[in-house]
Amino acid sequence: MTSRVAAARYGKENVRVYKVHRDEAAGTQTVVEMTVCVLLEGEIDVSYTKADNSVVVATDSIKNTIYILAKQNPVTPPELFASIVGDHFINKYKHIHIAHVNVVAQRWSRVNINGKPHPHSFLKDASEVRSTDVTVTEGKGVDIKTSLSGLSVLKSTNSQFHGFVRDEFTTLPETWDRVLSTDVDSTWTWSTFSSVEQVRRSATKFDTTWDTSRGIILETFSNDNSASVQNTMYKMGERFLAAQPLLETAEFSLPNKHYFQLDLSWHKGLKNTGTDAEVYVPGSGASGLIKCTIGRGDVEKKSKL
Ligand code: AZA
């Protein structure tokens, strides 16, 4: 039997980085905390097949490089820092052709004391995480995805679900008014950038698009009289693409966190269903999971969700 390396990449994950920027003039400091993963591809097969380590940039060196590049370069926006890191590896090592860089940034927001922003104190004000997946490919350019995850939202009305398949497997009643809750996980894919310099020139777009997308998610979730998770997420994606011409696709993965109505009529005829429903049981078991990738024009359906 013969065999070969069909695909390979390697590198360092869970590289934790903290960087402070001291603005001496303003007397304020700004902090960034992030977790970085770098995986490299290239002419590295012999390290697997022939035990030839001459092609291996040690993962320890990869980790060291991340810290040095964090010292020498801006670490925000994360999309730019990840591009700088990826670009370094494909330029520094001739046999490395693709660098995959993932950056997960924590949200440290400035503390307000009596309405005044504190110069050097921060709080993690949400479970939300901003992350980016950047692939720098020699001779091709920089592919960037930005993700927002862990944004938990709930609406107590203006959500419906009816008209779905009813057959011998169906017990779910139709509803014209239900609780809707989810943890938003959304990813938007940028058109390929030709170089890290082009990413640098677009740097401000990453933060503004983050704010715009977050706003669209919250506004659409809140204001849409939802026909289904599917339809509400599609409206979010449509609005992402309309707001930012550099985006190619918008992806969503939304759990439908159920809140079950509770029949309490067994107790003295208490009315707690339909329009009388007030006390619900938040689900802790199976939940729906709805995914979609929204593209421009007639972009083909992708199965690799
Ligand atoms: N979409 C919803 O919004 N709610 C549901 C579904 C669905 O596919 N299935 N059960 N409840």
Image (tube, rainbow, N blue to C red):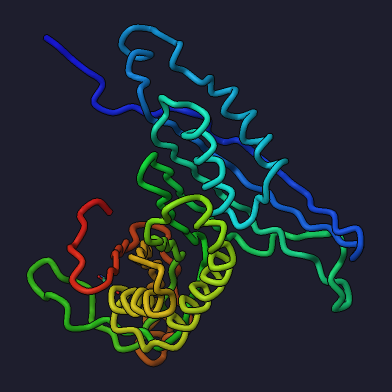
Residue 137 vs 277, above or below: the answer is above
Say whether residue 5 is visible.
Answer: yes
Q: Position of residue 258 (x, y in %)?
A: 38, 69
Q: Position of residue 277 (x, y in %)?
A: 42, 86
Residue 58 vs 91, above or below: the answer is above
Residue in the foreground of this view, choosing between 216 and 64: 64
Q: How many marks overall?
A: 0
Q: Quadrant of residue 67?
A: top right
Q: Is residue 62 left or right of residue 144?
A: right
Q: Position of residue 135 (x, y in %)?
A: 42, 45
Residue in the foreground of this view, choosing between 231 and 168: 231
Q: Is residue 207 left or right of residue 163?
A: right
Residue displayed at 21% across by 66% down: 299
Q: Quadrant of residue 178?
A: bottom left
Say whether residue 270 is visible.
Answer: no
Q: Is residue 284 left or right of residue 226?
A: right
Residue displayed at 44% across by 40% down: 100
Quarter of the C terminus within the rendering: bottom left
Residue 265 vs 151, above or below: the answer is below
Residue displayed at 52% across by 78% down: 215
Residue in the foreground of this view, choosing between 92 and 158: 92
Residue displayed at 27% across by 81% down: 161
Quarter of the N terminus within the rendering: top left
